[in-house]
Image: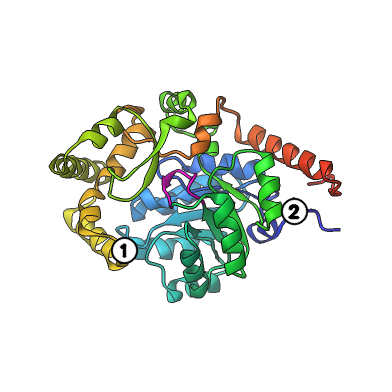
Amino acid sequence: MTNPLHTELCDRLGSRYPIIQTAMGWVARPELVAGTCNAGGFGFLAAGVMRADEVGPAIRRVRDMTDKPFGVNFHMFQPGAEQIVETLINERVRAVSFGRGPNKDMVARFRKAGILCVPTVGAVRHAQKMVELGVDMVVVQGSEGGGHTGAVASNILLPQVLDAVKVPVVAAGGYSDGRGLAAAITVGAVGIAMGTRFLLTKDCPVPEVTKQQYLKANVDDIIVTTKIDGLPQRVVRNKRIDAMEKASTLGLIWQSIQSGLEFKKMSGASYFDLIKSAKAMAHGGETTVWQLLMSANAPALYQRAMLGGDPESGLMGSGQVAGTIRELPTCNELIQRIMSEARARFTALGVPLDAAV
């Protein structure tokens, strides 16, 4: 009998366990990716917030710390996306995930190079579109997930996507323990993907003061706002969010201009790069002028919390599950605990398990 905890995700991504660490911007840096992979999970490096010339060195940094396979996330609308694609192909990473803007030719290039395409989606139609483009599997994030999020909860969205597509599906949004892993696999997923739970580990390089702010949050402190860039984002409520919620439209635009200049200074991007990126975002047809004006907010404000250690004046993207987390294990401690809990659930149901898993 097939062991339910050794799934197609393990076979295709090369991980020991069916657990993915998602590519959180300024969080999923080499230290966290390596910590996840060494513990038996599969980590994604967040290249979507890197300059094109930083991606290769970051990949090699991960390889300095682990010999396990890992993936890289990027966005087709970011400056230097074409160069990043070339880097990922040359570096032969195991998998890629990407944001808006992929096309069949790009997916075909990755697949020809032996690189799996594993995008994250938040709606049934987006999952179907990605499958039409030729991706290998999809990560489905319900509304409980952090950062940009949809409106449908995981336990509703996951079965819908499983019925709609014929590729392996990974469940995300609200997962943090072995009970969730067992539940997702029972429904039909090949594993789970977690962001916030991996952020709150000792291996994560986010400043301790920011982690402690997450640990203090209750479920009611984690809200969805459209004041950051016009799109729904789930974040931990803090002084910055309270101020943005009360601000006028002109005040938000002024905040965005300041954030854009701050991000330009930190990233080294030129005005041409920023304009090109904005045009690429708009090309998908789902981004309004208002959202483009506001889009400069997130990068600078997330960096304040995730790199600068200022969680009150920055942004703290968060899944709802953060409101239940009160400790910082290592990635290895976390993954071993999840697997032990999942084994216990299947054992309680009378499902035989291979002791090696």
| Between discs 2 and 1, the one toward the N terminus | 2
Q: Which mark is residue 208?
A: none
Residue 351, visible in the rendered structure:
yes
- The kind of secondary structure the magenta stretch mainly shows is loop
Q: Is residue 88 left or right of residue 335?
A: left
Q: Is residue 207 above or below residue 335?
A: above
Assess disc 2: are there few (<14), some (14-19) or many (≥20) residues with their C-alpha within 10 Å of its C-alpha. Answer: some
Callout 2 touching callout 1 (CB < 8 Å): no
Q: Which region is colored magenta? A: 142-150
Assess disc 1: are there few (<14), some (14-19) or many (≥20) residues with their C-alpha within 10 Å of its C-alpha. Answer: few
* Picture coordinates of residue 65, whole percent (x, y): 57, 42
Q: Mark 1 highlights which residue?
A: 286
Q: CA distance from mark 2 to mark 1?
A: 38 Å
Looking at the image, which is closer to me, 255 or 56?
A: 255
* Picture coordinates of residue 176, whole percent (x, y): 60, 39
Amino acid type, callout 2: His
Amino acid type, callout 1: Glu
Dot 1 lies on which element?
loop
Q: Mark 2 highlights which residue?
A: 6
* Picture coordinates of residue 110, whole percent (x, y): 50, 69
Looking at the image, which is closer to me, 118 or 241?
A: 241
Dot 2 lies on which element?
loop
Residue shown at 47% from the left, 56% from the top: 122
Looking at the image, which is closer to me, 1 or 202?
A: 1
Residue 202, visible in the rendered structure:
no
Q: Is residue 116 left or right of residue 246?
A: right
* Picture coordinates of residue 263, whole percent (x, y): 24, 43
